[in-house]
Image: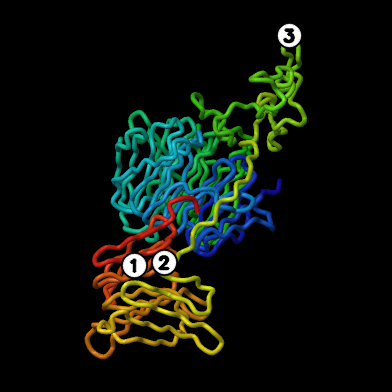
C-alpha cells in the first residue's frame, strides 16, 4: 500500500485573531495576506520563514493584487496601492465613509471593484481615473465578483441579498434574497464570497450548506453542489483559474473541491482546529495549490489533490486573453529598447527591432528564438507540461519605471500658532485673545490673555498633560494634546459661561490622536488621525461624528460655520 500524502498542510501564524484575507500575485509566486493587526505579509510559499511584512494601518480589511502592487483596504476608509518590495504608497484607488470589506480586480486589470461597510460599491477605472458608485444595498456589502466578459458585477450584502449589476449603467439586472440578514459584517453568518467561472457562463454563490451555479443567460440555478461532509454554512467559494475546479469552505473548517466538468467531489479536507475559513485563493500559475486563511489569522494550503497539472483558462475576445498571468492584456512582446537620440527624425532601425524580437534580418523574417537578454521569461512551473503549453511564453507585467519621490504632505497645524519646537510660543492669537505656552526645565505652563478684559480675566494653567493645540472664543477655551506612552489623546474644555462652579470638562480618545481643534457658537470640533471629525457642544455632549475624506490640515470655526482643510491627493 502506498503512503497517502496529506492534502491540507499544517497552518502557520499570519495575523492576529479576526477576519483575515488572502490573494496570490499574478505569477503565483507570492501569497499575500492581511488582517486585523494592520499588517500585510508576503509569503513565498507556506514554508517561507522570512516573509516580508508591511504595516499599513491599524486594521486591514481587504486585499488584492494588481500590476506589481498589492491593494489593501484599511480602517482609514481607503483602498490604497502599495509596492510589493518596500510597501511604499503607490496611489489611492478610492475612498469610502466606512472601512472597505472586499476588493476584486477585473480580468483586464482596468477595473478595480471595492465594497464598503457604508453600503456602497465603487468601481474604479484605472485608465479614466474615475469611480462609478453602485448604491442600493441596505447593509454593508460582503463580497464582489466582476464578470470576466466585463458586462456584469455581482455583489452580496448583509441585507440578505445577492445582486447582479450592469457595469455600464449601474442598474440592477437581477436580485435574490439568499442570505440571513445582519447589520454588521462582524456579526454576519456568511461572507458569501462570490466567483464567476473563467468563461463567464456561471455565477457561483455559496448558499447555506450548498454552492449554487447560476446561468448568466437565464439567471436561474442550473447546478447545486452538495456534499455529506458539509454540516455548516458555506461561507467562501472560489473557481480555479482553469475553470475545472470549484472550491468551497465552511464555518467549521471543512473545504470541499468539486470537478466543474462532472460536478463530482474530488477531495474533502477539514481544518485541524475546526476554525471558520474566511478566505480562499487558487494559485494562478497552474500549480496544484489552494491557499486559505481562518478567523484566528492562520494561513495554510491544500496541495496534491489534483492528478496532473492544469493550465489556466484563456478567455477569448478583447484584452482579457492572457490576463490571468498578469500581462493585463498587453501583446506578448517585450518592450523595444530604442534609443531615440541615436535615430534621425522619426527613423528607426528595422534590423535592430527584428533582432530584439528574435527574428533574422532576412527577407523571410526567420524566427531565431527569444534572445537571452529579452524580457521574456519562461514560467518555471511549466517546464514539464506538453508541447502546446510549453510553446506559450509570458512577459513581465511592465518594464521598470523611474521611482518618483512623493512630496511630503503638510502636517496638521492650528491657525495663529507659532512652531511647536520653540520653548516659548504662541499656541493661538485671534480676535479674542492670546494663548501662550512656556516649556522649559523649570516651567511648563499655559497663559491666556483676553483683548477685552470684560470677556474674562486672564488665566494660567499648569501644562502637565502636554497640551499642544488651543482654540479660544468668547464662550470657551479648548486645549488638546496627542497621545503619549502613558496617556491617551485628551481634549479639555473650559466653559466660561457654564452653570455652577465646575465649568471644566474633558474627554479621552484612547484609539485616536487629536490633530486639530476649533470653536464656534455653542459648539467645538476636533479632527483626529483616524479621519474622524467629532463635534461637541460646549457643555460636553458629542453631537455628531463625520468621516473626513483625507488627512486633516487644519480647522476653523465661526458662529455656526466650520471650515475643514484636508489633503485630497496621494498619501
Tell me if residue 361 comes above or below residue 436 in the rendering: above
Residue 483, can we see it? yes
Which disc is residue 228 wearing?
none
Q: Are marks 3 and 1 in contact (CB under 8 Å)?
A: no
Of circles 3 and 1, which is in front? 1
Q: Earlier in the sequence, mark 3 or mark 2?
A: 3
* Residue 457 point in image, percent of width and height: 30, 87
- Specify few, some or many for label 2: CA neighbours under 10 Å numbering under 14, 14-19, or 20 or more: many
Element on which disc 1 rests:
strand
State the separation of the CA atoms marked 3 and 1. Answer: 74 Å
Q: Measured from the top left, where is residue 226 in percent x and y?
A: 43, 44
Q: Residues within 10 Å of mark 1 (few under 14, many from 20)?
A: some
Mark 1 sits on what residue?
534
Image mark for residue 528: 2
Query: Secondary structure under badge 3?
Result: loop
Residue 172, relative to residue 85: is it above or below?
A: above
Say whether disc 2 or disc 1 marks the residue closer to the N-terminus: 2
Q: Residue at x 38, y 46 (%)?
A: 207
Disc 2 + disc 1, Cβ < 8 Å: yes
**Front residue of 324 and 516:** 516
Q: How far apart in space, not on screen, are marks 2 and 1 (Cα)?
A: 8 Å
Determine which residue is flagged by label 3.
Answer: 363
Q: Residue 364's x, y, as percent?
A: 72, 9
Q: Is residue 1 visible?
A: no
Amino acid at each position: 500500500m502506498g503512503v497517502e500524502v496529506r492534502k491540507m498542510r499544517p497552518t502557520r501564524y499570519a495575523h492576529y485573531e479576526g477576519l483575515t484575507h488572502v490573494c496570490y500575485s499574478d505569477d503565483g509566486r507570492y501569497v499575500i495576506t492581511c488582517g486585523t493587526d494592520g499588517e500585510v505579509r508576503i509569503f513565498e510559499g507556506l514554508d517561507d520563514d522570512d516573509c516580508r511584512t508591511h504595516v499599513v494601518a491599524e486594521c486591514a480589511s481587504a486585499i488584492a493584487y494588481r500590476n506589481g502592487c498589492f491593494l489593501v483596504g484599511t480602517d482609514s476608509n481607503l483602498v490604497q496601492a502599495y509596492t510589493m518590495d518596500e510597501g511604499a504608497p503607490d496611489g489611492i484607488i478610492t475612498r469610502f465613509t466606512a472601512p472597505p470589506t472586499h476588493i476584486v480586480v477585473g480580468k483586464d486589470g482596468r477595473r478595480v471593484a471595492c465594497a464598503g461597510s457604508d453600503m456602497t460599491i465603487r468601481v474604479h477605472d484605472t485608465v479614466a481615473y474615475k469611480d462609478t458608485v453602485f448604491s442600493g444595498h441596505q447593509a454593508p456589502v460582503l463580497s464582489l465578483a466582476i464578470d470576466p466578459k466585463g458586462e456584469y458585477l455581482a455583489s452580496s450584502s448583509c441585507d440578505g441579498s445577492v445582486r447582479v449589476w450592469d457595469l455600464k449603467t449601474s442598474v440592477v439586472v437581477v436580485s435574490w434574497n439568499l442570505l440571513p440578514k445582519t447589520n454588521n459584517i462582524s456579526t454576519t453568518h456568511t461572507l458569501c464570497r462570490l466567483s464567476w467561472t473563467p468563461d463567464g457562463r456561471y455565477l457561483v454563490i455559496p448558499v447555506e450548506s450548498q454552492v449554487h451555479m447560476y446561468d448568466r443567460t437565464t439567471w436561474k440555478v442550473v447546478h447545486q453542489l452538495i456534499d455529506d461532509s458539509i454540516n455548516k454554512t458555506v461561507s467562501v467559494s472560489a473557481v480555479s483559474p482553469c475553470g475545472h475546479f470549484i472550491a468551497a469552505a465552511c464555518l467549521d473548517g471543512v473545504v470541499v473541491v468539486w470537478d466543474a466538468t462532472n460536478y463530482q467531489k474530488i477531495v474533502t479536507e477539514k481544518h485541524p482546529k475546526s476554525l471558520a475559513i474566511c478566505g480562499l485563493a487558487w494559485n494562478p500559475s497552474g500549480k496544484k495549490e489552494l491557499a486559505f486563511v481562518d478567523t484566528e489569522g492562520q494561513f495554510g494550503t491544500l496541495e496534491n489533490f489534483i492528478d496532473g497539472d492544469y493550465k489556466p483558462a484563456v478567455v477569448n475576445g478583447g484584452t482579457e486573453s492572457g490576463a490571468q498571468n498578469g500581462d493585463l492584456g498587453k501583446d506578448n512582446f517585450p518592450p523595444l529598447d530604442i534609443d531615440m537620440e541615436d535615430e534621425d527624425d522619426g527613423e528607426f532601425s528595422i534590423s535592430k527591432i527584428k533582432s530584439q524580437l528574435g527574428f533574422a534580418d532576412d527577407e523571410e523574417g526567420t524566427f531565431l528564438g527569444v534572445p537571452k537578454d529579452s524580457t521574456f521569461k519562461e514560467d518555471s512551473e511549466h517546464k514539464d507540461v506538453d508541447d502546446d503549453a510549453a510553446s506559450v511564453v509570458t512577459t513581465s507585467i511592465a518594464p521598470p519605471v523611474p521611482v518618483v519621490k512623493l512630496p511630503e504632505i503638510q502636517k496638521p497645524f492650528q491657525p495663529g500658532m507659532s512652531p511647536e519646537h520653540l520653548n516659548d510660543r504662541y499656541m493661538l492669537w485671534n480676535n479674542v485673545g492670546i494663548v501662550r505656552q512656556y516649556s522649559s526645565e523649570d516651567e511648563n505652563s499655559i497663559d491666556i490673555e483676553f483683548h477685552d478684559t470684560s470677556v474674562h480675566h486672564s488665566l494660567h494653567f499648569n501644562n502637565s498633560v502636554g497640551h499642544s493645540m488651543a482654540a479660544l472664543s468668547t464662550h470657551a477655551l479648548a486645549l488638546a494634546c496627542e497621545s503619549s506612552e502613558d496617556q491617551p489623546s485628551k481634549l479639555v474644555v473650559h466653559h466660561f459661561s457654564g452653570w455652577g462652579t465646575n465649568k471644566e470638562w474633558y474627554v479621552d480618545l484612547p484609539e485616536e490622536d487629536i490633530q486639530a481643534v476649533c470653536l464656534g457658537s455653542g459648539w467645538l470640533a476636533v479632527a483626529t488621525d483616524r479621519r474622524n471629525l467629532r463635534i461637541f457642544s460646549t457643555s460636553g455632549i458629542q453631537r455628531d461624528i463625520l468621516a473626513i475624506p483625507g488627512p486633516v490640515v487644519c480647522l476653523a470655526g465661526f458662529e455656526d460655520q466650520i471650515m475643514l482643510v484636508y489633503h485630497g491627493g496621494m498619501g
